[in-house]
Amino acid sequence: MHQCPGYTRRQWMSAVTATAGALAGARPSLGAAPPTAPVAIARCNSYGKELVPLMEKMFDQLGGLRRMVAGKTVAIKINLTGSPNQRMGYRPAELAHWTHPAVIGTTIALMGKAGATRIRLLESPWNNADPLEEYMMEGNWDPSSLLNAAAHVEMENTNYLGNAKKYSVFTPPNGGHMFKQYYLNHSYEDCDVFVSIAKMKDHATAGITLSMKNCFGITPCTIYGDGAGRDEPSIKPSGGRGSVIHSGSRAPSKIAPAENDPKCPRDGGYRVPRVVADLISARPIHLAIIDGIESMAGGEGPWIGGVVPVSPGVLLMGTNCVTTDAVSAAVMGYDPMADRGRAPFETSDSTLRLAELHGVGTRDLKRIEVIGTSISDAKFDFRTRRRA
Amino acid sequence: MTKPSDWIPLYWPDESASFEWLKGSPVNCLVGERTTGDMAKRSGLDAVSISALESGVTLIRKAKWPKVPVTGRGKSRGVATGPTGAPWVDSNGWISSLTHARASGKTPEKPIWIVADPPKDSGMVRGEAYALAVADAAAYGSRWLISLDAQLRKGLSTGNAEALSTWKNISEAVQFFERNKTWHRYQTVAKFGVLSDFAGPNEFLGGEVLNLCNRRYLPYRILDPAVADAKSVQGLKAILLVQQREPDPRLQAVLGEFLMGGGLVIAPASLAHMASAMKAAGSFENSYDYFSHGEGRVAIARKLWTDPYQVASDAHLMMSRRHDVIRLWNAGSTNARYTRGPNGAGLVQIVNYATRAFGHPVSLYVAHPYRSAKLLGLSGQAPETLSITPRGEGVEVNLPPFPVYAAIEFGD
């Protein structure tokens, strides 16, 4: 079902073309209407075998994977937030705050089938430089099932320099909301296609966390972490990003630029959405996938008080991270046009609005085509599920 | 007189006390500072002076009062955490394990007692903290020489209700382990070996590595370089040499066989020359160089080891977590010991140094396809059957909240 009846196939193809332009590094100019792109929604109640045909269909609804990944190196940022030793109650992390390996594995398999030459799974796990495979095993995952889902699959922990000789530099448009440049692990540069596979969750600091907020974790803690070196990046990451990014109580390592305005608020609700909007405009997301099959409401991880398990039973994907997150927010029962003071942004600025300001995409549902299940049919109200 | 191995001892420094409250308790031996004849007469129990114990008992005098240490004062007061954010715990598990390993070939029947007094500045110590002292020793096959704070001793002598309640906690914990004495004969399940004489330059690093392996839920087999042989390394995937000196030819042959069979030997920088004839096989995190030998590999540290946490962490990762025999979730302030009995039954004992239940309950994974699991606790309630979820090669069980200790018995 299409939710935007006036939106034609031709218009959709032009949106896809606009995304292809972004792939080539084109950037919308300030003042132009932010681009749009369709978002596919599907109901899905389990991580079983039905995931393969379902995701295949969704990729086809977006124009097909082959066009996007054939002959390319694909980098996939997954979400393994928090410590692998932490669970929400008895629920394994993939049924609460981590993207599920079945969604990741299916994506890898279908990309391999579509001709991707190399697929790299990326994450900056909290507080460590362990190989990603080892981190997954600590959470009781079997990484070999992901490594064998297609040919030439690799993993890299991007929380530090890794095996590269230097960090890659990314520049957000318009001087950036928070930093004018970001120094990241080479993996975010050494790829042709960048994919964000996120979990559909509330977020204590940023209101919601979807494909854009997932990319908060691409910042290496050797530079942006609590234990980062003052002048040079530390060799290994230590701690989270609380002091540099959330509270601004210290600067990143001097290798990276300090924040644009040292007098700006020291409030995570102001800072985190700006950093996220900067990151996803400097390192564009070509494909956003939202795992909303099993999740949690009330926060982004078990360390947040009052979180509860939820089963929204929904998958979303799109080629524009802002449109995809805007539709996902609507599925969660939130108004994507809301800003600070209105749910889910009671105590934060809206990452959707800030990304829109960077010209990445529109959050206006009236301008976004929805393919497959409608928002109203997929809707799962997160706020009413929250524990008081 | 009861055999030392059957003694359930209580240290009692005040010879003039009444012992009426001890009636019906599991304690059968009083340990005093000097003369003990009068104590024996008044209590009707065996009584020995602590100085006379050494002939029948191995005392661990370097033991700590088990706890989660708190640092700072006022607003900065908090739990000390390690590099991973997990809290430090003061545990005697590693020193118990080491003492047992050293005694196994020499005095296996001699009981090992932990000597650790409660803190002097905390008023009456909580019953859970005492139960922890019992469990921290017994889970690793030792016995805590029960030692009470002054306020508790006074309260017990005068029949104070709170003191008697605390004593009940201690008695229940002791009785629990008495009922399950056979567990002491179970063997640690481990795929990781630590080879060291734990003496001289190897003493501190070796001990701390054992301590930190416990914190990583990485069970280990302690290998004595003087007697280690092919049988003692059987089943291991990796051996960490916390040994600065070159192994003698006999031990080199044992390690050579282990390598030929596909094992990993992790050695300090001081032994780099031993790999000089081997083929280079890559590196680990710019910290170790790999060399191949047969089906296996030797990892040689590039620098001198200074940080025991890093040594334990690197060794764990080089062996790979795919060889983990247990994993736990939401268990930050716990240590766990995994053993197996002669009939193949598995036993995981979890000691919670926080002495209070967690925010989120604990889940446990054991890398063996057990078919049944039951939970036992210190209070002596009937065992609770746990449901089992198959997961990879093993099973997961979910545990109800427990403040101090949980034992999970697994059956095939």
Image (tube, rainbow, N blue to C red):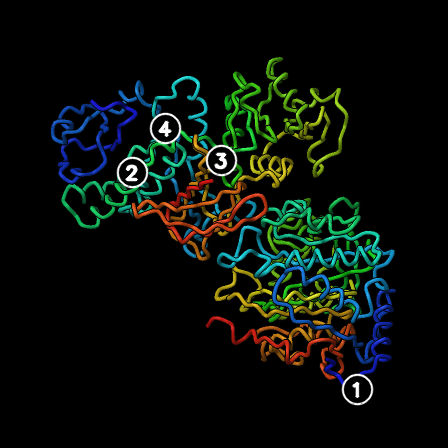
Q: CA distance from mark 1 to mark 4?
A: 82 Å
Mark 3 = which residue?
B211
Q: Determine whether the residue tagged by mark 3 lies in a helix, strand or loop.
A: helix
Mark 4 = which residue?
B61
Label placed on residue B174: 2
Kindly report which numbered mark, 3 or 2, lies closer to the viewer in this rendering: 2
Q: Residue at x 46, y 72 (%)?
A: A388
Kindly report which numbered mark, 3 or 1, lies closer to the viewer in this rendering: 1
What x and y, as percent, mark residue A213?
67, 65
Q: Residue at x 26, y 39 (%)?
A: B148
Q: Are marks 4 and 3 in contact (CB under 8 Å)?
A: no
Kindly report which numbered mark, 4 or 2, lies closer to the viewer in this rendering: 2
What x and y, as percent, mark residue A239?
60, 52
Dot 3: chain letter: B
Mark 1 = which residue?
A6
What x and y, as percent, mark residue A251?
66, 58
What x and y, as percent, mark residue A60?
79, 68
Q: Amino acid at mark 3?
A: Asn
Residue at mark 3 shares a chain with residue at mark 2: yes
Could you classify mark 3 by the number of other residues whose Cα lies within 10 Å: few (under 14), some (14-19), or many (20 or more)? many
Q: CA distance from mark 3 to mark 2?
A: 24 Å
Q: Determine whether the residue tagged by mark 1 lies in a helix, strand or loop.
A: loop
Q: Amino acid at mark 1?
A: Gly
Dot 4: chain letter: B
Dot 2: chain letter: B
State left or right for residue A22 relative to residue B284.
right
Residue at mark 2 shares a chain with residue at mark 1: no
